[in-house]
Amino acid sequence: MKERLLILEDGHVFEGEGFGADTYQMGELVFNTGMMGYQEILTDASYYGQIVMMTYPMIGNYGINRDDFESVDPAVFGLVVGEYCQIPHNWRSEMSLNEFMTLKNIPGICNIDTRELTKIIRKNGTMKAIMADKGADVAAIIEQLKQTDLSKDQVSKVSINKPFQIPNHADRVVLIDLGSKNGIIRELNLRQLDIVVVPYNTSAEDILALSPDGIMISDGPGNPDDVSETIETLKKLIGKVPMFGISMGYQLLAKACGAKTYKLKFGHRGSNHPVIDLASGQSEITAQNHSYAVEEESLKGTGLIMTHKALNDNSVQGIKHEAYAVFGVQYHPQSIDSEHIHPLYDQFYQMIEAHKEVR
Amino acid sequence: MPRRQDIKKIMVIGSGPIVIGQAAEFDYAGTQACQSLREEGYEVVLINSNPATIMTDTAVADKVYIEPLTLEFAARVIHKEKPDAILGTLGGQTGLNLVVELANAGILEANGVEVLGTELDAIEKAEDREKFKELMMEIGEPIPDSTIVYTVEEAVVYAEEIGYPVVVRPAFTLGGTGGGFARNEEELRDITKNGLKLSPVNQCLIEKSIAGFKEIEYEVMRDNKDNAIVVCNMENVDPVGIHTGDSIVVAPTQTLSNREHQMLRNSALKIIRALKICGGCNVQLALDPNSFKYYVIEVNPRVSRSSALASKATGYPIAKLAAKTAVGLTLDEIINPVTKSSYACFEPTIDYIVTKLPRFPFDKFPSADRRLGTQMKATGEVMALGRNFEESLLKAIRSIEMKVDHLEIKDLPESEEELWQKVKQRDDERIYAIMKLLRKGVDSQKIYDFTKIDRFFIDKLAHIVALEKEMKENPKNLTTLKKLKKFGFADSYIARNWQMSAKEVYDLRKANGIIPVYKMVDTCAAEFESSTPYFYSTYLHENESIVSDKPKVIVLGSGPIRIGQGVEFDYATVHCVMTLRNAGYEAIVINNNPETVSTDFSISDKLYFEPLTTEDVMHIIDLEKPLGVIVQFGGQTAINLADSLVEHGVKILGTSLKSIDLAEDRYEFEAMLHQLNIPQPKGETALTVEEALDIANRIEYPVLVRPSYVLGGRAMEIVHSDEDLRKYMANAMKEISHDAPILVDKYIVGKEVEIDAICDGKEVFIPGIMEHIERAGIHSGDSISVYPSQTLSQKVKDTIIDYTKRIGKGFEFIGLFNIQFIVDRNETVYVLEVNPRSSRTIPFLSKITGISMADIATHCVMGQSLKEQGYEEGYYPEKNNVYVKAPVFSFAKLRSVDTTLGPEMKSTGEAMGKDATLEKALYKALIASGVKVPTHGSVLMTIADKDKQEVLSLAKRFDNIGYGIYATSGTCRFLRENGIPVEEVARVNAEEFNVLDLIIKGKVNYVINTMSTDKNTTLDGFLIRRYSAENGISCLTSLDTADAILKVLETLSFSAVAMSEV
C-alpha cells in the first residue's frame, strides 16, 4: 500500500493510502453524498476537473460493469474514499474499482477521515486540492495550489469534436453536448428519436441547418460563464425550436434569456435532493450535481418563470419561458427503467409535437 | 397542508404485551406517535394493555387506558372518550387488527370515529393475499407464483403444479407465525395444516420459493399530497428464506449496484403510492443475484420492527413523522427534526454501515429447534454502527450478550462435515460455523454455493480470519493493534490471543493513542449542519462529540430484549434519564438496542449507540469524565459491568459495588442475612454429585438446584429425588461449568411474595407488596402477580415490611432494590433473593401506585434523601382497586420448547388488568394476555399422581359451572372414583381419537397438565403441552393458575340448580 497525501488549498493535509493511478492533477475538491453510483459519478463528464470525495465510506462493492458508464472516458481528476472494495462481487462486475482507475489513469486515496473532510468543505466551501506522495514538500504544494487557477476550458475538454448521428425515422433532436451523460441519450432513445449530437461550439446556423424538431442542451462541467459561445448560440435559437436544458444546459438557457448565475458554497451533489414542482406542489427526490445556480431575482424581466425549487435552500431548480417553448431543470431527471419515460421528457416531446403542428 | 383543525381528540392503539415478532419497537413507535400528536395540540387517548412500557406512562398521553386490546374493551373506551379519530398503524399488527375489528363491528361509524393514517381499504389490500396479488398485477409489480388455499389438499395440488420447494404463509399472523418452507409434500401438509389453524381467517398462501435471492427491504413514507420517500434500504445478509427479524441485516444495502437500487426503490415507491399509504410502510423485495429479476415479497402498511431499525439506523424518526402525516401535515412542510435546517421530505444518506443482529432465546431454551426459517424466533436485537462492515459486525457481536466477544464460539463441532451441517440447516450459529470453516481454509466460493450469502459478506468474514492470523503472528505489535481496532476487534479477544489481560490491552492502546473517536448520526452524511446528540465510535481522526462543562452522569442501558430482561428495564432507564435532566445533570445514555425508547436520541442529552462492554463504556467515560455511572436501571447487563468499571477507577453512583456484591455473592449474602437475623431457605453449595446428594438428604427433598453464578432462574430446577438430582448434576456438570459450584437449597412450599423498594442509605420506602398466584417454584416473571396482596395477614405483611427495611439499611442500598419472599404455611417469611437494582415489576408497581419509583430512586442516587423528596419511611397506603399482572408467552413460535412453568423464566411479556375485585382484574389480565375465558366449554386434565388429590376440588368446580371434563386414563379413573363425570381420552400413542386429536380439533378450551417424574409419561406430557401451544389452547401447568381461571369463570357463570336441590 502506497502512502499518499491529499493536500487542500486551505492548508489541510490528509494522510492516507493510495490506489488507482499514481499521477496527480490539481482539481476542485467536492463531495458526493450518494451511497451508490460511484461508477456513474466517475464517468460523468460534469465532474471533469474535480476530485470527488464520496461521503459513504465503503466504495466499489459491486465493481465496475460494462453498462453503467455515463461516458466512454472518465473525467474526474481523483477519487477520495474511506475504503475501496478489493474483491467486488456482482453478476455484472467486470473489474474492480482499483483496476478501473489504474486503467483510466485516475488517482485515488483511501483510509482517511472522509467525514472530517466533508465538514471542512461544508464550512470552507469547495476548494482546490491535489494528491501527492508521502514526503512531498507540502508547503510548496499548498503555495502552488493557491497560485494556480482552476482551468476554465472544461467543456471543450469533454465535448465531442465532430457531430455524430444516432439515426432513426422519427423526430429529430439536436443534442448540444457540453459533456453529456449517456443517460440523456438513453432517455431520448426510449422514444426512438433521431438524435444528432453536436459539439458545444456548433453555430446556431449549423444547428438550424440540421432542421431539428427539438434541441436539448446537456449537462457539463464548470462555470456557465466560461461557455459564452454556447450562450450566444442559444440566444439565436430561442423561439425557433423547442428547447430543453439540463443542469449546465439549463443554466445556459437561463443566461441566454438574460438571467444570472452564482456559485454555491459547496454545491449539490448526491441523489437525495428534494425538489418541489411549483405547479403541482409535488416533491421529487432528485439526483443533482452542480456548483452553480440560477439567481432567482435575475429571472425578472427575462420572460422566464421559476417552475421548480430546491426544498432545502430554496435555490431555483427549474425554469420555463412564458412565450417560447423553452424550459430546463437544474437536476438530472432520469427514468429508472426502460418502460417509464420521465415526465419532463414527455413534456419536451409534447412541445415538439405542438411546435410541429404550428409549423 | 396544515394540520387538521376538525379533529381534537385522537385515540391511539398500542401493541399490547411483548411477544416474539412484536416487541419493544412498538413502545418506541407508540411513544413517539403520542408525543408527536400532542406536540400538534391534539388530545391523545391511549389504550394499551402492556404496563411495562414508557408508552403507558401517564405523562405520554392525556389519558392512558391499560385495558385489554380487545373489541369489547376498546369499544368501552370509545364510548366513554368519544374520540374524533383513531390511529392504529403505530401499534403493530395488534393495533391494525383491532382497528379493522372495530370498523367491521360498526363501532367506529356508530361513534363517528374517523380512521387516521392509511385507509382501511389500503390495509386490506396490503394484508389480504388475494387483494395484494391483484394490486401488484394491476401496477405491474412482479410477485412470485402463488395461490391462496383454504385446505391442505388445495395446497398439495398447487405445489405439484409450480414445483417444490414452496413457502407457506398464513394470512394475518404475527411475525410470520405458522409459516414455513416445504421441500416436499409431507412438509407441506404439516406446515399448511398448522398455518391454516393459526390464521384467523384460515387462509394460507402457497408460494413458489425464491430461496437464494437477495432479501432487500425499503422503508418508505408517504403523505396525503403523494410525496413519497425512501427513508432507508436494508440488505439481509441471509438470502430469502430466513425471516428478516432473524436475519443479520445491514443498512444501507452493500451489494446492489445503483441501477439495481433504483429499480427496487422505484418499485417500493410505486407500491406505497398505489396503496395510498399515509405514513410509514415496509416493502420487502427479493432480487435475483444473477439478473435484474426481482419480486415483491411482502408489504407492511404500518410502522414495524424494520421501521424502528431504520429510524435508529438513519436518525430519521419514522413513527413521529408518520403520526404527523396522519393528521394532514405533509413531509415537505415538516422540518427534519435531526438537522433542524432541512425538511423531512428527503432521503437520508448515511456515512457508516449499520449491522443488526437478532437476539435468540436459545440460551434459555436449549431444547428449542434452532433452525431459522420464515417464522421469527428472536426476542430482541442489537444494532451497531461502524465505518466498515467488519467493525460494525464485531461491535454487534459483542453487544448481543451471548458470552461472545468475537465471531468465535466454543461449542462448535470440529469436523468440517458437522460444520457444514450447521451451515446448511441455517441455525442461529451458522455464522460462527462459517467462520470456523474459513479458518480451516475452506474457499469463500464454496460457502457461497451452499449458503447463497453474497460473496461480498463472506469475503469480509474471510478478511476477519486473515486479521486473526496477522494478530496471532504479531503479538503486541502496535501497527497490528491499530488495524485490529479499526476493524472492530475487542480488547478482550486480542488479550486472550496475546496472553494479556483486557485491561493491559486497553492500557497499551491508551498509552499509544489508539483510541476511538465519536461520529454523529445526522441523516445527511454531514452535508448539513446538525447538532444531533447521537454518536457511535470508530477509529478515525476527528472526534465530533463535544464534551460540555455541565456535570454529567452516564446511565447504562440494558441491551437487547431477551427473556428475563425485557422492556421493563428500558422503562426504568428512560425514567432515570429524564429525572437526571430535570435535576440539571447532563444525562448520557449508552445502549445498543434499536427497538427501545432509551435509544431515541431526543430522550437523553447524549446517546452513545455502543456495545455494553467494559472497553466500549470506558472509552466514553474517558472522554466525558462523568461524575459517575448509574448501573442499577439497566438490568443485569449494567450490574455485571460494575465490577470492572470500579477496577478502572470509575465511580458507581447509588448502591455501591460492595453492596451489590453483598447481594449477589452467595456467601456474603448468607452471612449478611444471618447478621440481620432474617431467615432464608436452608442451602449449601456442592462441587460434586456426592456432595449434592448429601446436602439434599440432609435438608430434605424437594430441593431447588442451580449453578451458583446464574441469576434470573437460568438452569434452575426443583428436584424431588436422588435419581432426579443425579440427572440434573450430570447435565449441570457437562453443560454449565467445571469450577462453579451448584447451589442446593431447600424448596419451601408456600406463597411467593415480591416487593420493590427504595432506600436512600438510611431509610426505606416500600410502595407496594405483590403476591403471586402461583406458589413458589415458578419464576416470578412467569407468575400472575396481584397487588395489593389478597391472602397475606397483617402480621406477614408487617414482617415483610420489617425485613425489607432491615435489608435496605443493612445492605446500605442507595436506589432501587427488589426482594422475593416465600411465606410458608406457618406464616414464616423467608427471603429468597435480593436484587440490588431495578426489577421487572418497577413499571407495573409505579403505574398502579402512582409512585414513580425510578424517579425517586434516581434522586436518592444523586444524593437526595427520601425525606427531602417528601417520602416517609415505611409502607405506602394500599389502593382499593385490584391490579393483576399476567405473563405472556411466545410458545407457539418456539418449536420443541417445553411450556411447563418452573424456576426458569419463559415468558416474553406481560399484560395488566385492573378492576374493583380480584376476579374482574384477573379476567381482564387473562383476556389481555391472550387467554380466552369462555363461559362454557371443556377442560382436559392430565395430572401427575402427586397432584391428584389437589385437583379434585378444581374438577368439581369445573363441573359445577357446566364445563365438560376430559381426562387421560389415570386421572379419569381417579376423578370417576370421586364421583365426577369425566370422558376418558386415549393416550398419545393410541390410534383412534387420542388426546392430541382432542387438542388439534379444538375440542377443549383449557388443558391442565402437571409434570410427572414418571419417565413413561414425560414425553406424552411434553407432546400435550406442545400441541396446546401450537393450537392456541391455554395449557396450565400450575394448579394455582387453574384455580385463578376458575375464579374468573365462576363469576362469569351461573349454575343451573333444580328447586329440589336447594
Image (spheres, helix red, strand yellow):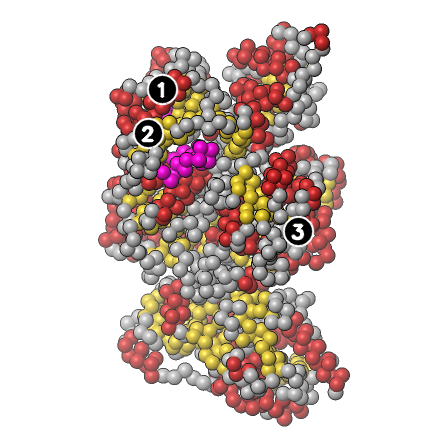
Q: Amino acid at mark 2?
A: Glu
Residue A112 placement: quadrant? bottom left
| Label 1: few (<14), some (14–19) or many (≥20) C-alpha neighbours in 10 Å | some
In magenta segment, residue B847: yes
| Label 3: few (<14), some (14–19) or many (≥20) C-alpha neighbours in 10 Å | some
Q: Amino acid at mark 1?
A: Thr
> Looking at the image, can residue B219 be seen?
no
Q: Secondary structure at mark 2?
A: loop
Q: Which residue lies at the image location 61% right of the left edge and 80% below the top edge?
A: A320
Question: In this picture, is B17 found above or below B444?
Answer: above
Q: Which mark is residue B119?
A: 3
Q: Where does label 2 land, which residue?
A: B873
Measure the C-alpha gap from mark 2 to mark 3: 54 Å
From the viewer's side, name the closer residue of B963 and B446.
B963
Q: Which of marks 2 and 1 precedes in the sequence?
A: 1
Q: Do discs 3 and 1 belong to a common subunit?
A: yes
From the viewer's side, name the closer residue of A86 and B345.
B345
Measure the C-alpha gap from mark 1 to mark 2: 15 Å
Mark 2 vs mark 3, foreground winner is 2
Q: Which of marks 1 and 3 precedes in the sequence?
A: 3
| Label 2: few (<14), some (14–19) or many (≥20) C-alpha neighbours in 10 Å | some
Q: Where does label 1 land, which residue?
A: B799
Mark 3 vs mark 1, foreground winner is 1
* Whole-percent x, y for residue B661 in the image: 29, 31
